[in-house]
Image (cartoon, helix red, strand yellow):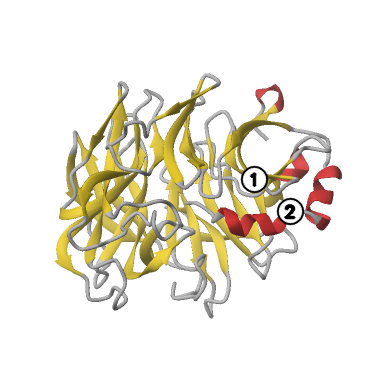
Amino acid sequence: MRLKQTVLKTIVGGHLIAAVAMAQTPTYKVIDLGTVGPNGQPFAITKNGMVAGAVQTGNTLRAVLWSKGKMIDLGNPGLQGSNSQAFGVNYQGQVVGEAQTTTPDPNGEDFCGFAALGLSSSGTTCAPFLWQNGVMHALPALGGNNGWAFKINIRGAAAGTAEKDTPDSTCPSGGPQKLQFRPVVWNNGYPRELPTDPGDPDGSANAINDLGQAAGASGECAAFNPIFLTYLQPLHALLWEDGKAIDLGTLGGTGLGSTPFNGNQALDLNNRGQVVGSSDLQGDANFHAFLWTQETKMQDLGTVPGDANSLAIGINDAGQVVGVSLDATLTQYRAFLRQDGNLIDLNTLVPAGSPLYLATACKINAAGEIIGIAIDNSGNVHGYLAVPNNNSQN
């Protein structure tokens, strides 16, 4: 998941920056990963500290890997196209994501949304990729032309979405998206289509754990969503086990809310089968982070006090949850860590006077290290790594 960076700039200044200066005793130190541009960000972190993401330079977005204090450009040469993003990485250094090719899209689609994001785009196909040993390889779709891979586990199995060659009647008339896209797991480079909820033509697998369980959503085709980087209107949060889809339920909403944040979807899961994501509340005006377990089913995690909305984006094997909490206007964001059953503003757990405001928390690894998007006092977008002091997990 990526929050549109131009929106994030609205939070800089005023009482939110002041809140950083009033921070409590530090429990995290923040490492600046550098500016990532309006559309870049870190997306995933391994237990040994490798971070996958994207950095925008000019009007081009490139997949990158931060490792051992260095940033590696995976998009040069990538798949020879203009833009790419790295969404997932495992501790062996295998990276997955999406990358433009040099093949013109025969249907005129903008599947990965690079044109919609205002980037230089040549109208070519966008392929899911696996990068390993310094080389990027395209992964096959399901008969269509496009797809993306979002996460990869320790066995090299990747989860994502891939196009079929079937026209999608639910896509908006006149829009660029024309074909159905389905949730997929690639094993040894071969795609296996996962079932959607009955009646849903489209879907995406957003996460996969080391046991092979996958989590994501299914729903209908919609206009491109700049928050979740997809044409999916997520109606059903799903967990896939042994090839079967389990509907995780909702917090009362239909998933048809009108903002780009709305929907019912799973965004991450850990090796204990615990799933996090977001669900619309009754009436679909607001959405909250959820935690689903086999024992308790879907739990509403609420928001940081004073906010109206939230998304749970990452969970580690210890059950620590991170995400973003938003106000009622969806213009003020703050990264959160779930601690002792409460959502805590991560900015209150970093040194006073920090030059970066932590807007989102995207993933948390086994060491409790957190990555996300931060904003400096000039409104520039940075990637960050928050490391627990004394390597403690709060």
Three-letter amino acid code at the position of disc 2: Val
Q: Please tell me which residue lies in front, 333 or 341.
A: 333
Residues marked 1 and 2 touching at CB (< 8 Å)? no
The x and y percentages for residue 147 are 27, 51
**Disc 1 from disc 2: Cα separation:** 21 Å
**Vertical order, 62 against 238 (above or below):** above
Quadrant assignment for the C terminus: top right
Horizontal side of residue 310 vs 26, given as left or right: left
Other residues around mark 2 within 10 Å, as few (<14) / some (14–19) / many (≥20) = many
* Residue 82 visible in the displayed image: yes
Secondary structure under the numbered disc 2 in the rendered image: loop
Image quarter for residue 331?
bottom right
The x and y percentages for residue 172 are 32, 76
> In the image as oriented, which residue stretches furthest toward the top?
68
Three-letter amino acid code at the position of disc 1: Leu
The residue labelled by disc 1 is: 337
* Residue 241 visible in the displayed image: no
**Vertical order, 42 against 311 (above or below):** above
Nearer the N terminus, badge 1 or badge 2?
2
Other residues around mark 1 within 10 Å, as few (<14) / some (14–19) / many (≥20) = many
Q: Which mark is residue 12?
A: 2
The x and y percentages for residue 335 are 65, 49
